[in-house]
Image (tube, rainbow, N blue to C red):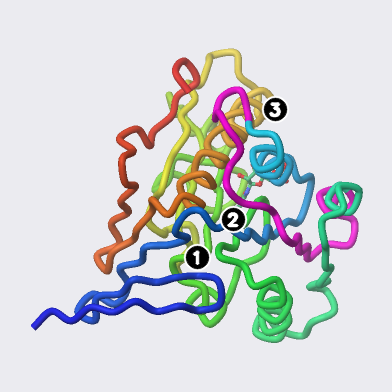
């Protein structure tokens, strides 16, 4: 027998069918969605996300119905943190080098994330492997951007590997995070064609340009409650047919 229920966890509403517990419908309109962004470095994706929420974008239209309520970095020197502070966004530094184990770091990270009561946690250049305990605590609400067309090129140095591997195309993937690194279900991808004259730097720049388009689209879909993720790890985005973006037709 099919049994259904609606659960409210803080500001997040989950409509769950007991027979498919992971079917998640998130962030019903018109409530403004709360995003926490985890960073380690430069922060260009953080900026693109924040901009899409405070001013909208040419590409992506009107403002995304949400805000970056907190930024957490594991690195003290992260430019993303400095920028967030300048914008008046609340920040927290959790320096991973001060923790003896991944588990101990992740306990502290979870405390910091939960303090912001987020609907979604967005990894934007967060260069730490997270423990399954942390990942499972936010399953369906934890999203990553990775600089390759997954399942191709999980891991590091993706631009160099794409060039060395003679790839014809490359790009970025935005996906739900699951315990297996860089393997969670894809929400959207942005594709760039590799040119003969590309260097690691030129390719990285074009991939980042795509990232700054695609991540705000995903933030919009999340904030509008359009994204669901089922137990067989299929992602659905209601009323959206195009989830693969390309340079020519973003
Ligand atoms: C982005 O290109 C992102 O895809 C990548 O780090 C960069 C961060 O740039 N993420 C990963 O490699 C995660 N495995 P940013 O700090 O300018 O947003």
Of callouts 1 and 2, the N-terminal one: 2
Of tags 3 and 1, the one toward the viewer is: 1
Which residue bears the numbered disc 2?
32
The residue shown at (70%, 76%) is 109
Q: Is there CB contact under 8 Å for labels 1 and 2?
A: no
SS at circle 1:
loop
Of tags 1 and 2, the one toward the viewer is: 2
Residue 179 makes an appearance in the image: no
Tell me the distance, in whole angstroms, between the alpha carbons under discs 3 and 2.
Answer: 37 Å
Give coordinates of residue 104: x percent, y percent.
71, 86
Q: Does residue 159 appear left or right of residue 188 in this picture?
A: right
Dot 1: within a 10 Å radius of its alpha carbon, few (fewer than 14), some, or many (20 or more) residues?
many
Which residue bears the numbered disc 1?
141
Of callouts 3 and 1, the N-terminal one: 1
Image: 22 above or below 175: below
Tally of numbered tags: 3
Image: 3 above or below 197: below
Q: Does residue 46 appear left or right of residue 60 in this picture?
A: right
Decide if ligand 1 comes within 8 Å of the CB at mark 3.
Answer: no
Which residue bears the numbered disc 3?
201
Residue 25 makes an appearance in the image: yes
In the image, the segment drawn in magenta is 57-82
Tell me the distance, in whole angstroms, between the alpha carbons under discs 1 and 2.
Answer: 15 Å
The quadrant in which the N terminus is found is bottom left
Image: 46 above or below 199: below
Give coordinates of residue 25: x percent, y percent.
37, 63
């Amino acid at each position: 027998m099919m049994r259904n229920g609606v659960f409210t966890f803080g500001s997040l509403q989950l409509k769950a069918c007991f027979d498919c517990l992971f079917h998640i419908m998130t962030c019903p309109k018109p409530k403004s969605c709360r995003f926490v962004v985890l960073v380690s470095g430069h922060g260009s994706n953080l900026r693109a996300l924040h901009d899409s929420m405070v001013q909208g974008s040419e590409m992506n239209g009107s403002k995304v119905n949400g805000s970056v309520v907190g930024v957490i970095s594991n690195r003290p020197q992260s430019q993303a943190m400095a920028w967030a502070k300048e914008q008046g966004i609340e920040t927290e530094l959790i320096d991973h080098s001060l923790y003896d184990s991944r588990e101990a770091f992740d306990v502290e990270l979870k405390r910091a994330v939960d303090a912001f009561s987020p609907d979604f946690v967005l990894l934007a250049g967060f260069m730490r492997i997270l423990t399954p305990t942390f990942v499972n605590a936010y399953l369906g609400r934890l999203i990553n951007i990775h600089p390759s067309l997954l399942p191709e090129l999980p891991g590091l140095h993706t631009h160099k590997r794409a060039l060395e591997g003679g790839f014809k195309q490359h790009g970025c993937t935005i996906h739900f995070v699951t315990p297996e690194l860089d393997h969670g279900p894809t929400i959207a991808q942005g594709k760039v064609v590799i040119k003969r004259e590309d260097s690691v730097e030129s390719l990285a720049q074009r991939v980042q340009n795509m990232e700054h388009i695609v991540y705000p689209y995903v933030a919009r879909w999340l904030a509008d409650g359009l994204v669901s993720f089922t137990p067989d790890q299929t992602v659905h985005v209601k009323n959206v047919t195009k989830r693969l973006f390309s340079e020519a037709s973003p």
